[in-house]
Image (tube, grey):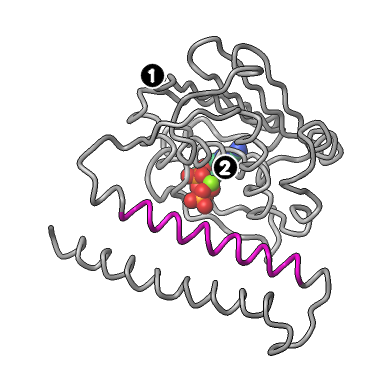
Amino acid sequence: MDNKDYLIDLFIHDLTGVLSIVSTSVNGLLKRPDKYGPITEKQQKTLNMIVRNSNKAQNFLNEIIEIYKSDEGLFKKDLFPIQNIIRDSIIEAMEIVDLSNAEKFSFESSYEEFCRQLKEQGIFINISGKYESSPFCHDRKKIQQILRNLFTNALKHRREKVTIAISGDSDLMVIVEDDGYGIPKEKRESIFTRFFHQKETNRTESSTDGLGFGLSCVKSILTMMNGTINLSSCEGVGTSFKVRIPPLEE
Ligand SMILES: Nc1ncnc2c1ncn2[C@@H]1O[C@H](COP(=O)(O)OP(=O)(O)OP(=O)(O)O)[C@@H](O)[C@H]1O
Ligand SMILES: [Mg+2]
């Protein structure tokens, strides 16, 4: 281990402590009205979201620790319907890009109702092929990370529309397309480089700015999965990312 690794270990350790304080405090607000006073329905919704996201951050940290500890494969095999993972990833991406809009969606509504709500927001999902009716076998959390990153970028850069197309009879194929300003030819290689981030001029002060980390992580995970990612973009018209993921053996 070099000095950088020890520092990162220390940060992971300290972050775990900080996050557990966030969870415990918000859980207190939610569960102890006798101590903290009553909360409104709207406040409850926001507090639930804080709990959900701090748990998620804690799970990410646990996963980092698991990866360091484990000598086995990097992927945990799981069988899951692709529809579930798309819904979770879109809501997570919405929470990053447009929190007030994300609050309109629910993890509990039917998939059909969810798609209908998405259409109203200019987001279209089209599923065909084997995985329309059969579950996909892979590491659920890693697939969700890939999708969340692509959806976040598409939602950030779209003008109006995002289209998600799922297909494939063996390898899972995912296309995420937006109608944004596109990526100039000379930048198309560098966007997969760690910490490449292009400042966005058309965004508001309050919107969250990226780290320039997402696509390089997506590409590395896909390489470990023997998958691929391809980009096509037309300036002024939009961008499309096509991902191919071979399933793990059941
Ligand atoms: N759909 C898209 N349309 C236009 N540009 C994009 C799109 N997706 C990515 N980019 C460009 O690629 C860059 C790198 O994307 P990447 O996801 O790696 O980082 P980011 O979104 O800036 O930050 P984060 O680490 O939070 O994801 C972005 O800064 C942006 O300039
Ligand atoms: Mg990104």
Residue at 83 percent of width and 75 percent of height: 40
The stretch in magenta equals 44-65
Q: In this figure, what is the number of numbered marks?
A: 2
Quarter-of-image position of residue 131: top right
Task: Specify few, some or many for label 2: CA neighbours under 10 Å numbering under 14, 14-19, or 20 or more.
Answer: many
Left/right of residue 222 with respect to residue 39 in the rendered view: left
Query: Is residue 50 located in the magenta-colored stretch of the structure?
Result: yes
Residue 118, percent from left and from top: 80, 38
Mark 1 lies on a secondary structure that is: loop
Residue 9, percent from left and from top: 26, 65
Q: Main secondary structure of the magenta part?
A: helix
Quarter-of-image position of residue 23: bottom right
Of pointers 1 and 2, the one earlier in the residue sequence = 2
Residue at label 1?
Answer: 249
Ligand 1 in which quarter: top right
Residue at 48 percent of width and 15 percent of height: 171
Residue 250, percent from left and from top: 41, 20
Checking the image for residue 227, the label placed there is none
Amino acid found under the numbered disc labelled 1: Glu
Q: Can you tell which of label 1 and label 2 is closer to the viewer?
A: 1
Quarter-of-image position of residue 125: top right
Amino acid found under the numbered disc labelled 2: Arg
Residue at label 2?
Answer: 148
